[in-house]
Amino acid sequence: MFGFRRNRERHGPFVYLSEPTFLYHTRTEKAIVEIIREKLDSTNVLVPSKYGLKDTSERIKEAKYFVAVAPLGKFTSLVGREVKMAQELGVEVFTLLIAREEDELVYLWVEGIPEEVEWLSPEETEEFMKTFLNSEFIDYMKNAFLLGSRKRAW
């Protein structure tokens, strides 16, 4: 109506992205979507953060490709559950191993699931998330409040 929204036509196969919730609405998530667009030539990507905490796993069966994100080589319990669903449904799975080196995202795109990926239980996921979020919070507190920096690693 006012021209604020661009009509973005989606092209390519439907891709289901499975990522840990702590990556929702981060610049890492934006980078992940760009990597998927480049690797699979698709803008038809289900980005879970657009649905909040609503379960979208019923859409896995519609996907041609399933991309599982493994920060620091770990599948959180939610991502692991969705990977198993995708495998059972016969959806082609890709793993995106990601890490940060200072301000740069380092990633490895793998077809299938690498053996070295660690599958976390719900308890291990909770501990991983606490460690992950605490390091982000401490960095934010040190830099943002004291120095005025808005740097966030992820």
Image (spheres, rainbow, N blue to C red):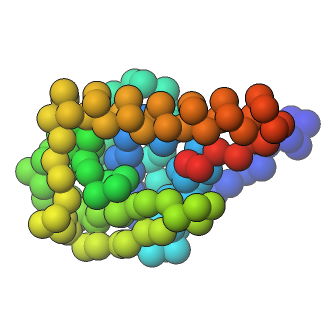
On screen, residue 88 above or below 146: below
> Residue 128, position in %: x, y?
31, 37
Residue 144 visible to the viewer? yes
Residue 12 visible to the viewer? no
Quick one: 125 or 8, which is closer to the camera? 125
> Residue 14, position in %: x, y?
40, 57
How many marks overall?
0
Classify residue 78 as left or right of residue 27: left
Quadrant into which the N terminus falls: top right
Quick one: 95 or 74, which is closer to the camera? 74
Classify residue 131 as left or right of residue 80: right
On screen, residue 14 above or below 79: below
- Tell me what residue is drawn at x 81 percent, y 38 percent: 147
- Tell me what residue is drawn at x 12 percent, y 66 percent: 115
Query: Dividing the picture into quarters, in which one does residue 110 lie?
Result: bottom left
> Residue 101, position in %: x, y?
52, 64
On screen, residue 57 above or below 40: above
> Residue 105, position in %: x, y?
53, 64
- Tell me what residue is drawn at x 57 percent, y 31 percent: 137
Classify residue 100 as left or right of residue 104: left
Query: Dividing the picture into quarters, in which one does residue 87 lie?
Result: bottom left
The residue most toward the right is 2
- Tell me what residue is drawn at x 49 percent, y 27 percent: 52
Classify residue 27 as left or right of residue 56: right
The residue most toward the left is 88
